[in-house]
Amino acid sequence: MPIENSFQHDEMSRKNPGERLSVREVTPTTLSESPSGQEAMALAGKRLSQAGVRLIVLLHGSIMGTDLFGAQRLDELGGLKRGYSRGVTGLDALLALLRDGSNGISSLSGGLKPPLANDDATKRLLDEQLGDAGNFTSAYLEQMKQSLNRGLDRPISCIRELWACEHHHLGRAMAAITLLGHLRDWVETHKLGQGDRILVEAHGQAGLVLALLSNLFCVTATSSRTRLLDLLSAYASQVNRPDLTSTIQRITPLLANGTLLNGATLDVVTFGMPVRYGWDPSGLGKLLHIVNHRNLRTDGKTWLAKMELPQITMEMPIAWGGDYVQELAVASSDAVPTTEAAKAANKALWELVEPLDGFERWLECARRAVRIPSEGLGILADYKDSTGSTNVRDHYFGHAVYTRLDTMLFNTKAITETLYSSH
């Protein structure tokens, strides 16, 4: 996408990304049992520190209880009721694999639903129910701190951040505002400035929050940014969200004069992020997208996923082709806001960030099978999580593996080698 992207949707190009893309094989490594792995992590920590990385933020949501594929919106659009599935063999079965209640993904205990609170109690609940499946656990955070900072005079701070997990435009836009407020807090707390870097590692739809944030972060003011902030301000006032109002008031002038990070640089890595919103790289430092991918195509386009009906409904339950959430949670899929005020605000926002809407639009985007956005570098990594198991909890359709403890070493080495090799 261009500089000053101004919230345009990604063009979802099927062209070969060329030099932007690399392909890797993952070797799972249990760090506690691998002295060489510990040494590699310490070396990565040294490289990150030399590059100026002072803070790593692990941003994630919950696979459970959040309408992971956005099937609510697809049903609201009437995929079956309006007969769009007629003549498309296997579509009914595919939609059943996407829906909460028939996809095998459990609910959170107590019926907990978004918005999820970014507090210790909720994080403990996710750790208990999900373990390290699509969830940056407390154990992951502690192991990262210890292994990266071994031998560093100035330790790299690591933070685990749980976003509210409202899988719709309004929810993601509010999360982007909240994150901008947190970024300002962290800059002040850690006394960051010129030459310092913040690295955000975002799992799944948390990456879409960062995509919106990049458009807000644009180095020049745009009318679209003003409109989005005005829409959110009006909604915050309507539903009595003083926290959102005060954050918008605090960050707006800092966005306008480019001082929100006090001269520090924001680098972003996404894991398994669906390709939807366009990115504006002008206000970011480095940008990398990592996707769990196994080539099933016979046409030579190895950089694309495979989306053929009805075959996909046989591949998905064993995560044969990699990350199916990344492939299918695309435009027009979403959870549905729960109040009339939120629905109205969400509609106003989707006209700005994703104007083309409809069941056929979703099917078109899914069939494009794009793995890597138009901006940033990409890694297609075979995480070796397809073992033949049809138990969803083993892989969550290929979307769980990025946050496993035994893939931390691969992720960290891939990030440092790709983004910080010159340091």
Image (cartoon, rainbow, N blue to C red):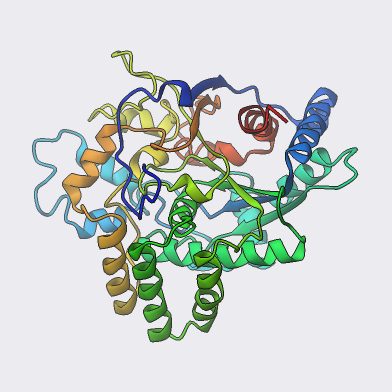
- Residue 187 position (above or below residue 199): below
Relative depth, front residue between 265 and 248: 265
Question: Which residue shows up at 31% across the image and 51% down it?
Answer: 8
Q: Residue 95's spot in the image, x, y percent?
A: 27, 45
Question: Which residue shows up at 50% across the image and 71% down it?
Answer: 252
Question: Which residue shows up at 47% across the image and 21% down it?
Answer: 19
User: In the displayed structure, does residue 210 sit left or right of residue 227?
Assistant: right
Q: Residue 392's spot in the image, x, y percent?
A: 47, 40
User: In the displayed structure, does residue 350 sit left or right of residue 173?
Assistant: left
- Residue 42 position (above or below residue 68): above
User: In the displayed structure, does residue 292 sit left or right of residue 299?
Assistant: right
- Residue 319 position (above or below residue 353): above
Is there any visible trace of residue 172 in the rendered image? yes
Question: Which residue shows up at 23% across the image and 56% down it?
Answer: 355
Image quarter hosting the N terminus: top left
Is there any visible trace of residue 113 in the rendered image? no
Q: Residue 68's spot in the image, x, y percent?
A: 41, 51
User: In the displayed structure, does residue 369 sit left or right of residue 269?
Assistant: left
Q: Quadrant of residue 147?
A: top right
- Residue 227 position (above or below residue 148): below
